[in-house]
Amino acid sequence: MSTIDEIFNQSLHVINIGTSKFKEDLDLQGIDTVQVDWQPPAGGNVQLIEALDFFQDNDKVEQANQEAIKRIKEAHPFLIDVDQAVNVIPGMHSKKILHSGPPISWENMAGPMQGAIIGALIFEGLANNETEARALIDAGEIEFDPCHEHSAVGPMAGIVSPSMPVHVIENRTHGNKAYCSVNEGFGKVLRFGAFSDEVIDRLKWLRDVFAPALKKALALTEGIDLKSITAQSLHMGDECHNRNKASTSLFYREIGDYFLQTDIDKQSLREVLRFIQNNEQYFLNLSMPACKSALDAGHGVPYSTVITAMSRNGVEFGVRVSGLGEKEWFTAPANFIKGLFFPGYSEEDATRDLGDSAITETMGIGGFAMGGSPAIVQFVGGEVEDAIRYSEQMFDITVSENSNYSLPTLNFSGSAFGIDLRKVIETGILPVINTGMAHKVAGIGQIGAGIVHPPKACFEKGLMRFYEVYGGDGINE
Amino acid sequence: MASKVIIENNAYHDSVTLMSLSSKINNYDGVEQAVVSMATKMNKDLLEDIGLLTDEAEAATENDLIIALIANTDERVEEVMEVIHEELTSKKTKKGKGKEVTAKSVHSALNAMPDANMAIISVPGEYAAREARQALKKGVHVMLFSDNVSIEDEKALKEMGRENDLFVMGPDCGTAIINNGGLCFANKVSEGGIGLVAASGTGLQEVTVQIDRLGYGITQAIGTGGRDLHESIGGMMMLQGLKALENDDKTKVITLISKPPAPSVQDKIVKEVSQCKKPVVVCFLDGDAQAVEAAGATFSATLIDAARKSVALLDPEVKIDTEMNERVTAWVEAEKGKFSDSQQDIRGLFCGGTLTSEALSIIRSTGESVKSNVAKKAEEKVADITESVGHTLLDMGDDEFTKGKPHPMIEPTLRNERIIQEAKDPRTAVLLLDFELGYGSNDDPAGVTLDALKEAKDQAEQAGRHLSIVSYICGTSKDKQDYKQQQKKLQSAGVYVADSNEMATRIATMLVQKEVN
């Protein structure tokens, strides 16, 4: 703030909005200047600008957003149990299958998602082979729902079937729970749509051997503090989406002794421990529900423009907004990922962006924390500098920074979090997601990794709906 | 001939960048026509004119970039396309690698610079008010360079500024000097005791430059934008500026500059001036001297006179020499002898709008009739801006010339073409030109005009005529372009360089009048 009387006694600090030519001459004079790399707001869309202006600097929205990010930040997720989905996930039943992303019907699903569902039906014993599985689905016997609408999240195809074991996460601050399957490891896995015997056998082992053992170990704990592991692993170079090396190790260290305290036979114990040890991505399936439990706590704050979920089903990208309905998704065709391909694969092989894992970015880690994870940036085809710039840029579209999740390379500032619908529209900057790429054909698996953004239209639709609900007279009451 | 048109969707670039790129590319070997622009209605018409409006270009929207090129061969088209792409993207890479902070919005800029106190806005007019509003809401003063801001928006913004005790300079405001910092187009002048508020850009430049040349200096130079003294705005910013300078301890003398205000606004300003505790100089070109003097202020009819009177109020001891020296009269006599009978007219090709107005006022006062595109009186209005008739003064920075083209202060191609055109007219005796130095202007305004000046002289000579060129360089010895060098370049082409716009105009008038005064 600088009034007219004050400005004559202050040195000039100039924001230059528009042509950079003026900045050059301000630089020449040694005047401190920030250049605004200006683009027409909301792509010049008049209706959006009107909506945007309506909510800009609006006290109710500001307060609601502060409340939403307070809840998200204060959430404290613990891993408390593992159990079969049908036993713990609300609304789950023996003929229901959950998938990643916004709602989608069977015939519209991407290859890997269909493959994974076929695998799940075989695993459940509802079908003996692909033909039977398809027949069952065609007969309308199976009900599909998004994981997100059942307090759950799933990586890639994100398939959760009734008897599949899921991690049970409790947000002890707000009392809500979140669920996620157990990460199967790499190679031929269900989440990429593979359903060979090897895949089904692993799922059965997870259900029959691994999960009961973990359940016993967890019963001895007071819950494993996932917030703490995430914070520590961010300092150890993970961003907890594509890199979970440190977090998995920390989890392994935490849980190891409890396993030894159980009555499980030595052979099984070794298998169980080795399974975690050999799977660097184990923690992803804890990171995701931890984020989910925090963001669900931040959902449902009236007037809040904070994004509480970003998710994709391999066809469409969907976002949810805190101040709007729990099942209200704003969707648009998902983008293709830009990045590095494993040898032998190219862009033509890739499916569209897929999976619930963008929940980590919604929380301000993953792509948002890439600047703190130098090891990951090459994998996704960038340089460390790019990664730091991405992390810094995310402050332009978020409400705040999460001091719980600080990044050493950003001078320990917290990661940007609380994606603000308004700021995305205003700046045209889209959230950055770093993610794996799936082959479009079911079962082939991961073919690379890279960077992807949500389609802008998701946010545009969200804002227009927000205007419909809170615009007009409503907001000034 | 080969051509190619490319559309890039949602690739916004600012128009100044694109225009300078277009003009650069147009000078490349083998390039017949190059258009790099946003797909606005106007630019699409332009494309149609050169026969490159493809269906895809037709369908493009204002957020899409059009690159259209005609060159002598297909290879050349490809090569130049490559260059254009490099130019458009290289800046981004540089930004990324350097330590430069760039932001995407006012809000993110404030994150990067929480103590920001001034926003300079040069985005397209339809969006400018919105950016200004955001800056004002955050307590940041605004300099609104953009034109095409609606008068309703201007009023609302200025009211907002007044309520929050913030400056709203502009819209269409090209010049300000705040705390010795030149904003947009401004000269480097000494610090001193004179504070200025002006509804004119080059007018403000000229007065500050002349104050500097007299060995004095300024505190603040506040630009209000050209419409501030219109009825509907009511001089809101000029009044606010006047008050600010009255409250500023360092300011000893206050100088107001404008083209004639609306009568009711003049009354309002004169009333405030009469209550001002500090001496005030009012320079309203073609204004009402009596009203100003009745308010106890000093009236000036020309810009240099405003500078002189301001300095005299600051320092009563000052000696100012306004006599025209013998060298000038001798030069004028010699030149006059070389004209053919047909050569009667002054053709003024200006970059500065207020300098054009001042020249108009001066030439009229000598009894000559004169036409201009900045004239207010109907009988002085230029009928067709593409053709000069009689004494004609053109502000080539006016919108009707600059639509889709860079302002001649930045890039003088437009004026150079017109210089040749005027030289070919057997009626033209004198070319009257201005050159603006300082921040924002071309790095070598004289240099980039030199070829055109030489060609103009040659053309006239081949037709058996002699062309006189009189110019004024609005600049100080401290300006980045090096005043001395600029002067030398013009003199080398036989151009007379006067010490003020007023003097240049008087010399031009003397050249075409029958008697030397």
Image (spheres, coloured by chain):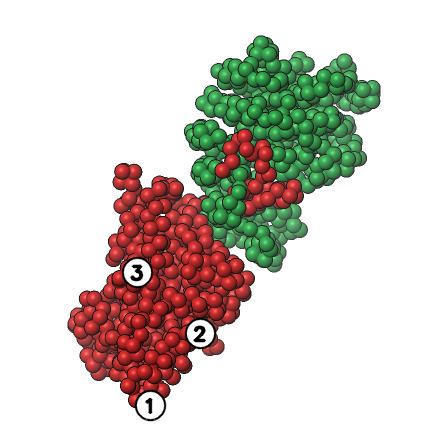
Chain colours: A red, B green
Q: Residues within 10 Å of mark 2 (few under 14, many from 20)?
A: many
B35 to the left or right of A365:
right
Q: Please tell me which residue lies in front, B423 or A146.
A: A146
Q: Quadrant of residue B457?
A: top right
- Whole-percent x, y for residue B393 in the image: 63, 25
Q: Position of residue B265 (x, y in %)?
A: 50, 18
Checking the image for residue A173, the label placed there is: 3
Point out the frontmost of discs 2 and 3. 3
Are the residues under badges 1 and 2 in a single subunit?
Answer: yes
In the rendered view, tell whether residue B85 sits above or below residue B241.
below
For the residues labelled 3 and 1, the Cα–Cα distance comes to 38 Å
Task: Please state the horizontal and vertical placement of residue A139, each as a whole percent of the image.
Answer: 16, 72
**What residue do we see at 51% from left, 33% from top?**
A3
Q: Nearer the viewer, residue B490 or B154?
A: B154
- Decide if residue A84 is on the left or right side of residue B205: left
In 3D space, how far apart are the residues under numbered discs 1 and 2 (Cα atoms)?
Answer: 25 Å
Q: Chain of mark 2?
A: A
Which amino acid type is marked by label 3? Thr
Q: Which element is circle 1 on?
A: helix
> Which residue position holds label 2?
A245
The reply, left or right, for residue A93 in relation to residue A343 is left
Front residue of this view, candidates B123 and B190: B190
Q: Amino acid at mark 1?
A: Gln
Q: Quadrant of residue A181?
A: bottom left
Check disc 1 and report the residue beneath it.
A267
In which image quadrant can residue A286 be found? bottom left
Q: Residue at x 62, y 17 (%)?
A: B279
Dot 3: what SS?
A: loop
- Chain letter, disc 3 residue: A
Image quarter (top left, top right, bottom left or bottom right) of the C terminus of chain B = top right
Q: Are the residues tagged 1 and 2 within 8 Å (C-beta)? A: no
Q: Closer to the N terminus: mark 3 or mark 1?
A: 3
